[in-house]
Image (tube, coloured by chain):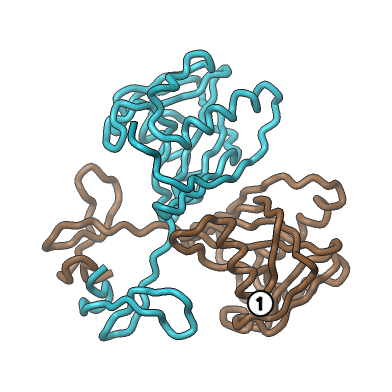
Chain colours: A brown, B cyan
Amino acid sequence: MKFCPHCGNTVVLRIPEGDDRERHVCSSCEVIHYSNPRVIVGCLPVYEGKILLCLRAIEPRRNYWTLPAGFMENGETSVQGAARETWEEARAKVENTELYRVFDVPYINQVYMFYRCELVAGEHSAGPESLDTCLYAESEIPWDNIAFPVISQTLKEYFPDAERDNYPVRVSSVDHRPRPK
Amino acid sequence: MKFCPHCGNTVVLRIPEGDDRERHVCSSCEVIHYSNPRVIVGCLPVYEGKILLCLRAIEPRRNYWTLPAGFMENGETSVQGAARETWEEARAKVENTELYRVFDVPYINQVYMFYRCELVAGEHSAGPESLDTCLYAESEIPWDNIAFPVISQTLKEYFPDAERDNYPVRVSSVDHRPRPK
């Protein structure tokens, strides 16, 4: 940020009075502009024991498989956002959403919230950001072509949980950028 | 937002190509500026069955009791943010943090994440944003003087959960601004 979104004058980085970290502060109108983590909401849609994955049509990780997910928008709940992303990316309707997995990714200022849910009628098809969509049984998951580590980890945890019919909500953080292969 | 934080020229509200909602877009450099919900992280610190509450020293709801909580910052995890807020507001250290309660508050574009945790050594004192801090047993909770509905609801759910030693992670949304009394 170089300019104040309120008045258009230049901003400076300084620690405001009563604060303990640097913020962008307008040199003219003195408004403090905060920057905070963003929430990524997504679904793990299940139909007859299979998981719905989307083949990404966009970078990063085009041509790799992912769970439907994206940035939570203003004015919606995290559940609504997860369902919206699932519709946008996989033209799939979901129900019985239950929070399942939370990841903090502090190095890119993101929090992931994945909801376990049922895929209505087993229906799905590629939305504009997907090349393909597919329901995968555990033995069919394309493990070498999963888009992001948080997706692999969520899938690896899911199948043993489903076996036990016990789905604890896990929270963990991804502390390092994945190394390029 | 009236001015582009990147180049200082005016922004307009319009739907970018490939998008389906209005964004602030710079009329000069064409950068799209997204606005997304913010995360509030907090703790429900427990010591010998009692809950640590803070008497707010700042508006809104000065002189009402709350759980320690505040905006998650860039570069931290939600657990770290919850612990940081608990130190800042109640000079309390916590351990064994477990996600306990999630609230969506779409009308103000916020997501609350409360962590259940143990208060180390039962030690606490008022930080700069608190007038007082106190450990309350269930029968002592000042129900008529709780700052926000999400705090009352979390406390009401906690004690029966503690009785059963079973703490499901609940997610719900607050759909309307509370009416003034």
Residue toward you, A72 or B70: A72
Residue at horizontal 29 percent and vertical 37 percent from the top? B60
Q: Quadrant of residue A177?
A: bottom right
Q: Return the chain for callout 1.
A: A
Q: Is residue A152 left or right of residue B111?
A: right
* Nearer to the camera, B60 or A180: B60
What x and y, as percent, mark residue A150? 65, 62
A60 left or right, relative to B90: right
Give the residue displayed 78% in from the left and 76% down from the top.
A134
Q: Amino acid at mark 1?
A: Lys
The quarter of the picture where the N terminus of chain A appears is bottom left
**Element carrying mark 1:** loop
Q: Which residue is mark 1?
A: A181
Residue B179, image x, y percentages:
37, 38
Horizontally, residue A77 falls left or right of residue A50, namely left
Asked if residue B175 is positioned above or below residue B160 in the image, the reply reads below
Residue B172, position as x, y percentages in the image: 57, 45
Residue at (59, 45) in percent of width and height: B171
- Total marks shown come to 1
Mark 1 nearby-residue class (10 Å; few <14, some 14–19, many ≥20)? few
Q: Nearer the viewer, residue A43 or B69?
A: A43
Residue furthest left in the image: A28
Find residue B113 and report its horizontal and vertical position in percent.
52, 44
Looking at the figure, which quarter contains the C terminus of chain A? Answer: bottom right
From this view, report whether residue B137 is shown above or below residue A97: above
Residue found at x 44% / y 22%? B143
Depth check, front residue: A176 or A116: A116
Left or right placement of residue B95 versus residue A5 in this view: right
Residue extending farthest to the top is B139
